[in-house]
């Protein structure tokens, strides 16, 4: 989560919503890392998680990420949570909860449906306050 | 939907789950079109909708698709439905319902939550049976 927060800070400095994500192997090696690039790429789907997941598959030359962990400092939105499901990630570790846009513990509650193809283990609220503080500071600076 | 079904047939012939998608302008011009390429690209997120939405933005040089319509022959999964939300598409027209993987009328029911940032108009079940037949034929051929 240290590294995810560092990536989030990089996003912040580029005027992006401060979200950073990593894909880790089962022995905790960093496979890929990315920060939110919605503004830079002018693509509303260029979330940190989507970029990190796609890059991990490219680096590993794998179609799925069975056994891998996605770490991100904010609760993933339904798009990213569903992508993680399609990639079959083993575990999602996230920082701050996102009552407005989150799709795991809020709203769509993606892994709470019987139809869910694959349910990663969820570890939520890791260094929640640090992440929340960074995000709050970012949105306040926009006002 | 004619064109979406044609694209779905192309996917079928390439051994892909037969799903085709288009993005249309408000005056019904086709902006982009794509079919499912999960196998070809070895990317479980390379759904027809994701590819068509991304391509439409690239072609139009726009960040969002306000006023545009996504047409697809199968109920979008939660990832694609959420992506359409992020792109702010005006309308989603889909063919067959997907009780197993769909994220609009099933499972996550993405647009049924109060937190939803943007709710496209949904027109569901257009030429449902044709699409259902094609999908059923595909999955039977795998057995």
Image: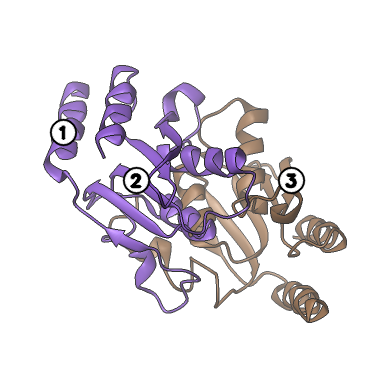
Chain colours: A brown, B purple
- Provide the secondary structure element on which disc 3 rests: strand
Image position of A133 (left or right of A124): right
Q: Given the current orientation, which residue lies at the most extreme top position?
A: B13
Q: Mark 3 lies on which chain?
A: A
Q: Which residue is drawn at 35% across and 54% down?
A: B92
Q: Residue at x 54, y 38 (%)?
A: B55
Write down the residue under mark 2: B71
Occupied quadrant, residue B78:
bottom left
Q: Which mark is residue B9?
A: none
Write down the residue under mark 1: B136
Mark in the foreground, 2 or 1: 2
Q: Which chain carries label 2?
A: B
Image position of A74 (left or right of B138): right
Q: Given the current orientation, which residue lies at the most extreme right position?
A: A13
Q: Which mark is residue A33?
A: 3
Q: Position of residue A143 (x, y in %)?
A: 78, 82
Q: Residue at x 59, y 68 (%)?
A: A124
Q: Is residue A33 above or below residue A106?
A: above
Image position of A65 (left or right of B49): right
Q: Where is residue A110 in the image (x, y as percent from the top left)?
A: 41, 62
Q: Mark 1 and mark 2 in contact (Cβ < 8 Å)?
A: no
Distance from Cα at disc 2 to Cα at disc 1: 20 Å
Question: Is residue A4 shown to the viewer in this render?
Answer: yes
Q: How crowded is mark 1: few (under 14 residues within 10 Å), some or many (20 or more)?
A: few
Occupied quadrant, residue A142:
bottom right
Q: Position of residue B19 (x, y in %)?
A: 32, 35
Q: Mark 2 and mark 3 in contact (Cβ < 8 Å)?
A: no
Q: Which chain carries label 1?
A: B
Q: In this view, does B40 lie above or below A1?
A: above
């Amino acid at each position: 989560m240290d590294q995810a927060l560092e990536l989030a800070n990089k996003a912040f400095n580029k005027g992006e919503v401060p979200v950073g994500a990593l894909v880790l192997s089962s022995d905790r090696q960093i496979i890929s890392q990315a920060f939110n690039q919605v503004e830079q790429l002018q693509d509303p789907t260029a979330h940190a998680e989507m970029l990190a997941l796609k890059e991990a598959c490219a680096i590993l030359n794998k179609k799925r990420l069975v056994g891998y962990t996605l770490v991100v400092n904010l609760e993933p939105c339904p798009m990213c949570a569903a992508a993680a499901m399609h990639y079959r990630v083993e575990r999602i570790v996230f920082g701050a909860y996102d009552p407005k846009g989150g799709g795991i513990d809020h709203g769509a509650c993606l892994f709470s449906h019987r139809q869910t193809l694959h349910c990663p283990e969820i570890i939520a609220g890791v260094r929640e306050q640090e992440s929340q503080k960074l995000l709050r500071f970012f949105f306040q600076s926009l006002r």
